Image (cartoon, grey):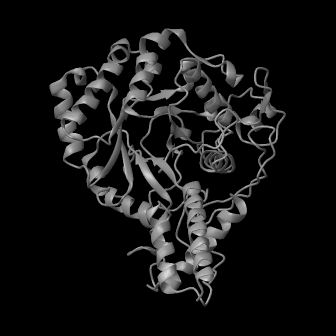
Amino acid sequence: MTATTTTSITTALLHLSTLLHLSTTAFSIGVNYGTLANDLPSPSQVANFLKTQTIIDSIKIFDTNPDILRGFANTNITVTVTVGNGDIPALVDANAASRWVANNIEQFYPQTRIKLIAVGNEILFTGNKEWISHLVPCIKSLHQALVRAGINDVKVSTPYTLGILQNSVQPSAARIKPAYGKVVFAPMLEFLRQTKSPLLVNPYPYFSCSPSISPSMEDYILFKPNPGIHDDNTNITYTNMFVAMMDAVYSAIKAMGYDDLDIVVAESGWPSLGDPNQPMCTVENAVLYNKNMIKVVTSGEGTPLMPKRRFETYVFALFNENLKPGTAAERNWGLFRPDFSPVYDVGILSNIGSPSTGASPSTESSPSPTTRPSTGSSPSPTTGKTWSEPKADASDKALQASKDYGCSQGAHCKPIQTGGSSFNPNNIRSHASLLIPLIMICFVYI
């Protein structure tokens, strides 16, 4: 083998590894793991399912359930935990915060990859003055408790509803409501900047639905072709509400001087079933919304005001939860049933070649989030319909180097790791034949 040939192969392997990394990043997603049900599998079963059968690489829970934290130990799945709303005032005290960190973080970390503490949920929306006034001091107190405990890579933030915004129909005009801006939001944003923590938001186009909604607005919410909403300030026409919401958040924090912050989608989703007076709650609509939302946050195209960005995102929710109060819709946000069968398919199963057992209606092509040309839908790399063999002259050493590099950079290698669905036959050529289609999908479509 000549030096030129060796160099060419090395360059090609590095290029393909990079493409593999991009492909994996594009299809990794998080999920909200709620537990208001009496028929759910054990946390260890859930952890094993997510690790071996899906591309879900992070979860967010609404408490600090020790069974869940133990169940996700040594899985490499990251976990966001939540401080209860009512616990916020007491945790302003330094001693109380240290005890909370000792009981809920230290005894599980780092075996369980806890990455963030969410302090409360949509506190400003509750209107509870005690919680609101103690929110930022509580966040700072917990951060300081983590530092005292020697834990430097667990961030602290709090999720916000988009009800904090005003004038958000045209995204560039959106601003934080004055009642929250200087007193709560400005010190919060400054804390997030100083600690390199993300801003958590819960954009829910679903809640803009109403019985009197116009057909064009329904299409705007569900990523269907529609006339769009024109932003006079930027001359951008938005053709779906989710992207408009994200740019509205960006505009609001930019106006306060904090456009450098990362924005995380802490919750977003769509119910697949509702009461008779909830006609928008269908499997078809859930597929339309979640597939397109996932495409927006993972594609790397970003939004008009935040181009070339991906957004860490947690779909709501992992399971249907049969004990949630309220309408039928509240109990049917899940991607999966308690027996792990999918309610519908949005491309997050990683078990190569396994059939989908959930409803998977075809969906019409969705428009680009703006009037910019669409790049088309990216097919899921998890269908397993195409296998490719490595070239005969590719050495095992070269293939192993390519595999090791791609996996070390965050590539989705779960199926070919020990215990994975495609681990056997356990040899480098078999594993490479699985990785090559993912690389080619990325090359053609990303």
Left or right of 194, for residue 93: left
What residue lies at 45% left-to-right and 19% top-to-bottom? 124
What residue lies at 51% left-to-right and 80% top-to-bottom? 398
Q: Where the C terminus falls, by quadrant?
A: bottom right
- Percent of width and height locating residue 211: 71, 28
Q: Nearer the viewer, residue 195 or 119?
A: 195
Does 240 appear above or below 297? Answer: above
Left or right of 295, for residue 133: left
Does 232 appear above or below 225? Answer: above
Q: Nearer the viewer, residue 29 or 143?
A: 143
Left or right of 52, for residue 2: right
Q: Residue furthest right?
A: 227
- Percent of width and height locating residue 1: 58, 89
Count of numbered labels shown in the rendering: 0
Q: Is residue 320 visible?
A: no
Quarter of the figure with residue 280: top right
What residue lies at 55% left-to-right and 55% top-to-bottom? 25
Q: Nearer the viewer, residue 372 or 2?
A: 2
- Percent of width and height locating residue 439: 62, 68
Q: Nearer the viewer, residue 334 or 114?
A: 114
Quarter of the figure with residue 170: top right
What residue lies at 32% left-to-right and 60% top-to-bottom? 44
Does 412 appear above or below 335? Answer: below
Left or right of 170, for residue 248: left
Q: Is residue 13 visible?
A: yes
Does 142 appear above or below 270? Answer: above
- Percent of width and height locating residue 142: 27, 30
